[in-house]
Amino acid sequence: MVLAQVETPALVLDLDVFERNLAVMETELAGTGVRLRAHAKAHKCVEIAKRQIAAGAVGVCCQKVSEAVAMVEGGIGNVLVSNEIVSSKKLASLCGLARQAEIAVCCDNSDVVPLLSQAALGAGVELSVLVEIDVGGGRCGVAPGDAAAVLAEQIDGAGGLKFAGLQAYFGSAQHRRTFEEREQASSKTVEGVRLTKEAFRKVGLDRDWVTGGGTGSYPFERDSGLFTEVQAGSYAFLDADYARILDGGGKPTATFGHSLFLLSTVISANGTDRAVLDAGHKAHSNDSGPAQVFGMSGLEIAGQADEHMVVAIDADGPRLRVGDQIHLIPGHVDPTFNLHDWLVCVRNDVVEDVWPISARGPGY
């Protein structure tokens, strides 16, 4: 099947660019002693995770137990749930996975330690637990330094648990536009890690494993001398939001290329200044802004509804006709992946494979 025969809206992966992105990230980390732990929350697709690991990733991280279940059942053997899990049923499921694969989870509260311990002992496994610190994101995480060390001691002394290391992730820092803004945020992250590792050393619990960072900030974590992993995910696809971040010279960073597209079709073209596509909220998440038209100048997404997307056409823009296919760069890949059951994989406009997005949905 050629791409023009694919029914739309469809999520499409350009395999050549995707594979090049994987190779570039491996090159970016080569010789540094820092490994990629690919963030599977970006794509929720086992086949992508397998290719990331084949390209050098040590494993994947997930945000939900359901994502971890899909990954392990699909053959992924090393999974970190980089989030706090507090439900006894979810923890039982997670500890069940630890019989089949290397599983770790984060913790930022002493009240959760007995729950983790009970689940691990009940499953007859030793569960690896990382302390998560708040490095400025104001989301999950215990305060860096002594408070984190106290929590590490509680984890280390609990039955069924193994204190394994440190999670330090500053989510919003990934999307700060300028290089200087990202550098400043990342320096706060690195300082939090330094303080915490020193506190761990004082109580005899320093661990090598330090994980965090992402597509927007990974060079800073990579070069910190403290991190052993970076948790990039969007690097493999490059959405419109990440394409807007700037390098040290004030220009859009060009480290990675656009590999993920929302293929759509013009279904209405009654005016010269606009056209309507067959993809809307149910096919594209605009939480980080509208999609961008790829490879065609003079076109801009002007609005999005449940099943429609309006394209504004400049005076010098192309004349769109009913039936034309348009490639869109998603504004944010993570929630856009989550809206689709399948990923259509193409090379030179020929469909090479179709991969299920097996962990999609709200999850648990």
Image (cartoon, rainbow, N blue to C red):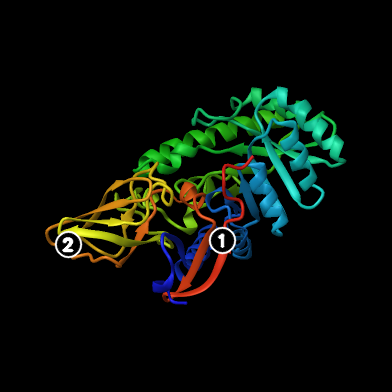
Q: Quadrant of the C terminus?
A: top right
Q: Is residue 101 left or right of residue 106?
A: right
**Secondary structure under the numbered disc 1 in the rendered image:** loop
Circle 1: residue type = Ala
Task: Report crowding for label 1: few under 14, some 14 to 19, many 20 or more residues within 10 A (C-alpha).
Answer: few
- Which residue is identified by label 1? 30
**Secondary structure under the numbered disc 2 in the rendered image:** loop
Q: Nearer the viewer, residue 327 or 164?
A: 327
Q: Is residue 334 above or below residue 207?
A: below
Q: In the displayed image of the protein, which residue is found farthest to the left?
A: 315
Q: Is residue 35 left or right of residue 111?
A: left
Q: Is residue 78 above or below residue 135?
A: below
Which mark's residue is nearer the viewer, 1 or 2?
2
Q: Is residue 264 above or below residue 111?
A: below
Q: Position of residue 362 (x, y in %)?
A: 57, 42
Q: Which is nearer the N-term, disc 1 or disc 2?
A: 1
- Examine the rendering and report whether any part of residue 107 can be seen: yes
- Which residue is identified by label 2? 317
Circle 2: residue type = Gly
Q: Position of residue 48 (x, y in %)?
A: 58, 61
Q: Residue at x 60, y 49 (%)?
A: 229
Q: Residue at x 17, y 62 (%)?
A: 317
Q: Nearer the viewer, residue 329 or 312?
A: 312
Q: Is residue 76 left or right of residue 224?
A: right
Q: Nearer the viewer, residue 281 or 124?
A: 281
Between the residue at mark 1 and the residue at mark 2, the CA separation in whole angstroms equals: 43 Å
